[in-house]
Amino acid sequence: MNEDVLRRLGATLASRRHADPAVSYTAKLFAKGPDAILKKIGEESAELIMAAKDGEADHIVYESADLLYHVMVLLTFCGLSIEDVFRELHRREGVSGIEEKNARTAK
């Protein structure tokens, strides 16, 4: 179920990739390009940090959803999908975080 909602969101975002920016917030982000999308990710990240510092669970969940949405907009803009992220997470599953980080820096 959890992965399904992200897949449906991904499909919706892909359908808005070339939609009219006047009628879709997502299409407006796509039309503005990567700088606007990245700015939103930065804003949403900061809002999540502040929510976490406040310790309000509902606010943390709300801001996390906003951040995930905007990350998925970026993925779609870059021709990627949540499936790409799922594959990477599955690849990392069961691997020590220290080992995974060391493998990245050894390249």
Image (cartoon, rainbow, N blue to C red):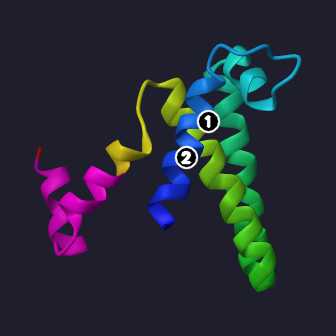
Q: Closer to the camera, 66 or 5?
A: 5
Which residue appears at 16% of the width and 72% of the height?
A: 95
Which residue appears at 81% of the width and 82% of the height?
A: 54
Question: As shown in the figure, which amino acid type bears the numbered disc 1?
Answer: Thr
Q: Which mark is residue 12?
A: 1
Q: Which residues are magenta?
A: 86-106
Judge whether 31 appears above or below 51 on screen.
above
Is 103 left, or right, of 53 in this rendering? Answer: left
Which residue appears at 59% of the width and 45% of the height?
A: 9
Please give the residue where the numbered disc 2 appears in the rendered image.
8
Judge whether 3 appears above or below 58 on screen.
above
Q: Chief secondary structure of the magenta span?
A: helix
Badges 1 and 2: C-beta atoms under 8 Å apart?
yes
Is 11 left, or right, of 54 in this rendering? Answer: left
User: Which element type, helix, strand or loop, lies under badge 2?
Assistant: helix
User: Which element type, helix, strand or loop, lies under badge 1?
Assistant: helix
Tell me where residue 43 appears, x and y as whole percent: 75, 48
